[in-house]
Amino acid sequence: MTNENLDLTVFYEFLTENTAIGIHAINAQGETIIYNEKMKKIEGLNLDDVSDRSILDIFRFNNADESTLLQVLQSGQSVINVKQTYWNQNGQEITTINDTYPVMKDGQILGAIEFSRDITTLEKLVNQPLQRYGEPITFEVITAVSNEMKRVIQIAKKAAIAKLPVLLIGESGTGKDLVAEGIHNATDPISEQFITVYCNRSDGNVIDKLAEQLIDLPASTVFCERIEYLSLEQQEKLLEILEQYGTEHLFIASVGNDPIDLIAENLVLKDLYYYFAAMSITIPPLKERLSDLLPFVQDYLSRYRRFFGSQIKGITNEVEQLFMHYDWPGNLKELEVLLDEMGTMMTNEEYITYDILPHHFKLKVQEYRDTTPLHAEDFVIQAEQELMPLDTYLREAETYYLNKVLDKYGQNITKAAEALGMSRQNLQYRIRKMKSTKKTTVD
């Protein structure tokens, strides 16, 4: 059968239904026309639930403008690597990272198509507090090497001295809970207790429970995590609590986005923002303070060794480079969860190598690793260097050497094969094998 007679539709359908990425396409009217198996699992819906229906009839967004599919359909411009949180018709919360593109023909927009990676579980993980391993959190134990985090700690110390209400602003997993507890432990005298209130959308009584807890409670620090998740009615109740107990307790709140935007979207009451606005601290995402990343890893491993008696001393240079080039959408919490996962898999190993990285993380960093050039010094064994498996060393050494020879002879296969003392066919086979295992360039 020739390619001309081959029905590619079968291949397209197989690809769409079996890929690990969710695919959702809409027509020019905003109605669903493609909805693959992975997308059904991500959003908890069936094809019948979405067919020929508008996006806004199926899903709820904080703001209609937040639908990346509808944004692209309206603007005709692609949006890449955008995080989106929304709810299906059953009230299930979904968080994805989306790449969304307009579908055009002859300058006319026919629709839009979206490729989604599910990070709902990750988002729930990063909303959990960073681990303490039984140690009190003070400003001294918070990793703050970057100028950005040094400024955060500087302002937080002033907040502790002033004992004023504080608003912490930052993405999930950035360590807002650590800064809040650091403020608590820096007050003089230290408040009796540190209480965290998780403002959960599914718990309609969370503020009523707080009101009961505060009755006859000695002076304490109360940290209200993600107040934008409270209904406006609950926020009104929280304001009443602040007015009643604000002089007895130190109240700290956090939000995940710019509070002005949250007010504009009717997610945060203006009066509630004003209560905390006198002392606000923005904690930048990890990708904007990468100089904190490796020190955080070392701080974490140090605590891990003390708590579990672990032998892990650090990470290899290769893993360092992968960590520094990954964008960490889950911030410090994602990094901590990853280190936890690897720690449980390791026995007597002293260094975290590429081979120890979980498969799901390798997939995230594979594109960078495939395009990372090898250098001659990569094959010199240093005394303190973690040894790689022999097959990995030989494969990478062969890749390096073949690329060097090919560069020398201007990519001329015949001359390179002659210099290497092998047949042209053998060299071509090795090149194909090299490209299929790792697309490596050499400088």
Image: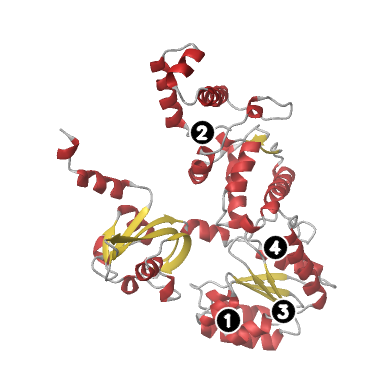
Q: Which residue bears the numbered disc 1?
A: 208
Q: Are marks 4 and 1 in contact (CB under 8 Å)?
A: no
Q: Amino acid at mark 3?
A: Pro
Residue 64 lies, with reference to residue 123, above or below; the image says below
Instruction: Compare marks 4 and 2 and give the one earlier in the sequence.
Output: 4
Question: Which label lies toward us, 2 or 1?
Answer: 2
**Residue 440: numbered disc:** 2
Residue 296 lies, with reference to residue 79, above or below; the image says above
Q: Residue at x 61, y 40 (%)?
A: 319
Q: Are marks 4 and 2 in contact (CB under 8 Å)?
A: no
- The image quadrant where one finds the C terminus is top right
Closer to the camera in the image, 156 or 246: 156
Q: Position of residue 270 (x, y in %)?
A: 59, 86
**Image quadrant in which you'd find residue 385:** top right
Q: CA distance from mark 1 to mark 3?
A: 20 Å
Circle 3: element type:
loop
Q: Is residue 23 left or right of residue 124?
A: left
Q: Are marks 1 and 3 in contact (CB under 8 Å)?
A: no
> Is residue 343 something one can see in this rendering?
no
Q: Residue at x 63, y 25 (%)?
A: 379
Instruction: Compare marks 4 and 3 and give the one earlier in the sequence.
Output: 3
Q: Which residue bears the numbered disc 3?
A: 165
> Is residue 287 something one can see in this rendering?
yes
Q: Which residue bears the numbered disc 4?
A: 178
Q: CA distance from mark 2 to mark 1?
A: 59 Å
Count of all numbered marks drawn on residues in the image = 4
Q: CA distance from mark 4 to mark 3?
A: 16 Å
Q: Is residue 183 left or right of residue 256?
A: right
Q: Position of residue 242 (x, y in %)?
A: 67, 84
Q: CA distance from mark 2 to mark 3?
A: 53 Å
Q: Position of residue 104 (x, y in %)?
A: 30, 61
Question: Which label lies toward us, 2 or 3?
Answer: 2
